[in-house]
């Protein structure tokens, strides 16, 4: 059986926009994206047809989801429903790292 696999430790971070870097991996049904967010990063409110589950690995962020703001610290999770405008801001002066899980998959994220 041919199993798709990578090691993110061997992958370079890719610049998404000012202050945001990404590593991504996906299957036919799901995309995982590891993001490094730096304080003062470029903010980009957006929406997409994918459900997004966010897990904060390091740091602290404010997730703006629709008209609500949710502070999420390392170890915390949040769910962003499909089609809802959202964006994230780093809290404090340390970078944050988060793992996003998208379904359906986002092939445009693949490395």
Image (spheres, rainbow, N blue to C red):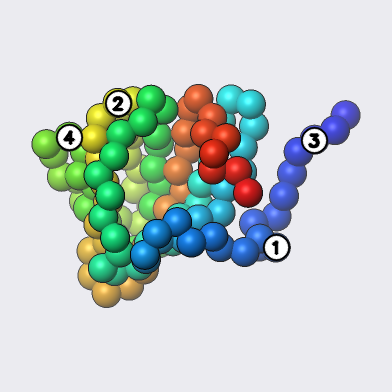
At 50% from the left and 55% from the top, the residue drawn is: 22
Q: Is residue 23 visible?
A: yes
Most foreground residue, 91 or 45: 45
- The residue indicated by pointer 1 is 10
Q: Which residue is mark 3?
A: 3
Label 2 packing within 10 angstroms: few (<14), some (14-19), many (20+): few
- Residue 14 lies, with reference to residue 51, above or below; the image says below
- Residue drawn at x 45%, y 43% is 100
Q: Earlier in the sequence, mark 2 or mark 1?
A: 1
Q: How many marks?
A: 4
Element on which disc 1 rests? helix
Q: Of callouts 3 and 4, which one flags the residue occurring earlier in the amino acid sequence?
A: 3
Q: What is the C-alpha distance between the residues marked 1 and 3?
A: 18 Å
Q: Which residue is mark 4?
A: 66
Q: Which mark is residue 83?
A: 2
**Which residue ends up furthest to the right in the rendered image?**
1
Question: Distance of mark 3 from mark 4, alpha carbons?
Answer: 38 Å
């Amino acid at each position: 059986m041919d199993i798709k696999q990578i090691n993110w430790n061997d992958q370079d971070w890719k610049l998404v926009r000012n202050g945001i870097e990404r590593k991504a991996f996906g299957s036919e049904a799901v995309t995982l994206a590891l993001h490094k967010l730096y304080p003062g990063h470029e903010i980009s409110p957006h929406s997409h047809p994918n459900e997004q589950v966010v897990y904060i690995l390091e740091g602290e962020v404010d997730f703006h989801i629709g008209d609500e703001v949710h502070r999420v610290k390392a170890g915390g999770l949040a769910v962003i429903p499909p089609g809802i405008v959202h964006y994230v801001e780093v809290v404090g002066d340390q970078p944050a790292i988060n793992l996003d899980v998208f379904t359906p998959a986002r092939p445009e994220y693949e490395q």
